[in-house]
Image (spheres, coloured by chain):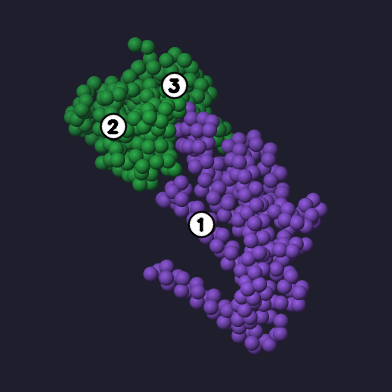
Chain colours: A purple, B green
């Protein structure tokens, strides 16, 4: 009941915004800014041409590749940094210097190193999703409560068993938060990366629609699509937070 | 019989702003094999520090701790700590918690031992539950089972039942005595609860305020099950409270 009411309120707000948008375009009489209906028609046009699916899969493929690559390195690094103070002391300053550099700033170097194919955006996704995962994993291991570490020492649990029974499960809620933040950032970055020197992906679609005859209806259609896919990715990640392995963190 | 635990000339100070705070300053203590010793003292007198050093989690500034004549250099499964805050892992099921300390056991043996010890503490049927689904008393019993399953020689208890409500606390003491009657261990209990000490221990060591010194040592010659309302038990409690400087009690019994 409450859920239905919340949903209705959210949908109402969106409908209101779309209404204001339509009215503003009608009142302004601009020949370039599209009406909501033109955007819907634009989306149908893209879908019928079959290009929509191609651009979406290109973008998703780049995100998945760069993201998984980052996860496979950042999570182990975060665990080692969190557990061994000496590693943390050595690596953290470097990490903190690299972290505030926007992935967009790496675009020139990415093109220089990896050219204008798929590899450049994959590299940028990798960079952007690496840091949130590394930092959150480190925090997750750092914040394991002392009584649990002491109990493990007390029972003489060490090595892989310690990793499997203490470190990984204790840090998992933080790791998942990092994974969720990273995926959000990765999706932001892929669109930006694709605006430059590529010929596929949703970012390319936006720039191409503008360049090829000011098709602002297609520009906005792509934007809406980017938002909806972003929401879907986040919903997917939220599912992970409900796993039994991490629900202990939220149970109390 | 040789002593299980010997503590000699133990000293420990903690740095505070503008100097250091001596918590222990030359403390001696011996616990015999299979003896149940309770250490009582006022809050902040250094009881927990003493237990942490004896269990190997902290290093003393001076003095030494020996277990079976061998200097203690760190924590070991020979002496398991049960503390007030509890350390049952919230991310592991009851079964995985209880078998946590069984490092190199075949799966079948692990299962058998888990069944045995969970039944001993009355947690059969909860094997697949998670700690968030258990009550405070059940968590404590799980912690006791997890300690006993590795067959430690010593149980260290630091205010083990202090976080429980009064009724559960009382039940847990009886439960602990019942379990210990089947598998006796050397026990070192640290508490500020005088009644708990009189209920459980064979010998009670009363500590002074910081830096902790031994103020008095009291034998508890009462047979189990103990009647805490018996005159002998009440006398003991009041004697210990007087030693702890609780004057109101002294005034009441000596008009």
| Contact check, label 3 and label 2, Cβ < 8 Å | no
Please indicate whether residue B249 sits to the left or right of residue B152 in the image.
left
| Contact check, label 1 and label 2, Cβ < 8 Å | no
Q: Residues within 10 Å of mark 1 (few under 14, many from 20)?
A: some
CA–CA distance between discs 3 and 2? 37 Å
- Vertically, is A101 above or below B97? below
Can you identify the residue that label 2 sits on?
B120
Can you identify the residue that label 3 sits on?
B27
Q: How many marks?
A: 3
Q: What residue is at 46 percent from the left and 46 percent from the top? A: A245
Q: What residue is at 35 percent from the left and 22 percent from the top? A: B186
CA–CA distance between discs 3 and 1? 54 Å
Closer to the camera in the image, A124 or A6? A124
Q: What residue is at 32 percent from the left and 41 percent from the top? A: B126
Q: Nearer the viewer, mark 3 or mark 2?
A: 2
Name the chain under label 1: A
- Dot 1 and dot 2 within a common chain: no
Residue A75 sits in quarter: top right
Q: Nearer the viewer, mark 1 or mark 2?
A: 1
- Residue B67 % position (x, y): 43, 18
Q: Residues within 10 Å of mark 3 (few under 14, many from 20)?
A: some
Q: Nearer the viewer, mark 3 or mark 1?
A: 1
Q: Secondary structure at mark 2?
A: helix
């Amino acid at each position: 009941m409450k859920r239905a009411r919340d949903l209705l309120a959210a949908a109402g707000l969106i409908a209101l915004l779309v209404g204001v948008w339509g009215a503003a375009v009608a009142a302004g009489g601009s020949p370039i800014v599209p009406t909501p209906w033109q955007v819907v028609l634009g989306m149908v046009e893209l879908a019928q041409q079959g290009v929509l699916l191609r651009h979406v899969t290109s973008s998703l493929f780049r995100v998945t590749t760069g993201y998984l690559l980052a996860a496979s390195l950042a999570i182990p690094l975060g665990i080692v940094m969190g557990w061994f103070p000496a590693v943390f002391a050595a690596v953290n300053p470097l990490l903190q210097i690299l972290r505030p550099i926007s992935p967009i700033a790496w675009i020139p170097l990415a093109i220089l190193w990896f050219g204008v194919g798929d590899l450049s955006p994959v590299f940028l996704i990798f960079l952007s999703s690496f840091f949130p995962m590394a930092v959150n994993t480190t925090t997750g291991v750092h914040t394991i409560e002392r009584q649990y570490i002491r109990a493990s020492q007390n029972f003489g649990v060490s090595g892989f068993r310690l990793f499997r029974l203490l470190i990984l499960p204790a840090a998992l809620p933080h790791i998942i938060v990092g994974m969720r933040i990273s995926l959000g950032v990765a999706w932001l970055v892929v669109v930006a990366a694709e605006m430059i020197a590529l010929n596929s992906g949703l970012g390319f679609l936006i720039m191409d629609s503008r360049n090829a005859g000011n098709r602002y209806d297609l520009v906005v259609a792509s934007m809406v699509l980017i938002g909806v896919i972003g929401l879907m990715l986040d919903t997917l990640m939220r599912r992970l937070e409900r796993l039994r392995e991490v629900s202990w963190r939220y149970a109390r | 019989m040789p002593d299980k635990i010997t503590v000699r000339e133990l000293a420990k100070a903690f740095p505070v702003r503008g100097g250091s705070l001596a918590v222990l300053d030359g403390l001696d203590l011996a616990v015999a094999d299979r003896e149940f010793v309770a250490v009582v003292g006022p809050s902040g007198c250094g009881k927990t520090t003493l237990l942490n050093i004896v269990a190997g989690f902290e290093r003393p500034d001076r003095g030494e701790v020996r277990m079976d004549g061998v200097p203690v250099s760190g924590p070991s499964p020979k002496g398991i700590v049960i503390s007030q805050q509890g350390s049952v892992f919230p991310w592991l099921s009851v079964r995985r918690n209880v078998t946590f300390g069984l490092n190199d056991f075949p799966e079948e043996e692990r299962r058998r031992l888990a069944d045995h010890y969970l039944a001993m503490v009355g947690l059969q049927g909860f094997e697949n539950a998670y700690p968030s689904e258990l009550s405070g008393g059940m968590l404590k019993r799980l912690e006791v089972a997890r300690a006993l399953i590795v067959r430690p020689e010593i149980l260290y208890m630091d205010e083990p039942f202090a976080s429980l409500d009064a009724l559960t606390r009382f039940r847990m003491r009886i439960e602990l005595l019942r379990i210990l009657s089947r598998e006796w261990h050397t026990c070192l209990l640290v508490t500020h609860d005088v009644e708990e000490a009189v209920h459980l221990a064979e010998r009670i060591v009363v500590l002074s305020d910081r830096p902790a010194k031994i103020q008095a040592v009291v034998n508890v010659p009462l047979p189990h099950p103990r009647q805490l309302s018996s005159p002998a038990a009440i006398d003991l409690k009041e004697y210990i409270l007087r030693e702890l400087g609780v004057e109101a009690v002294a005034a009441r019994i000596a008009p």
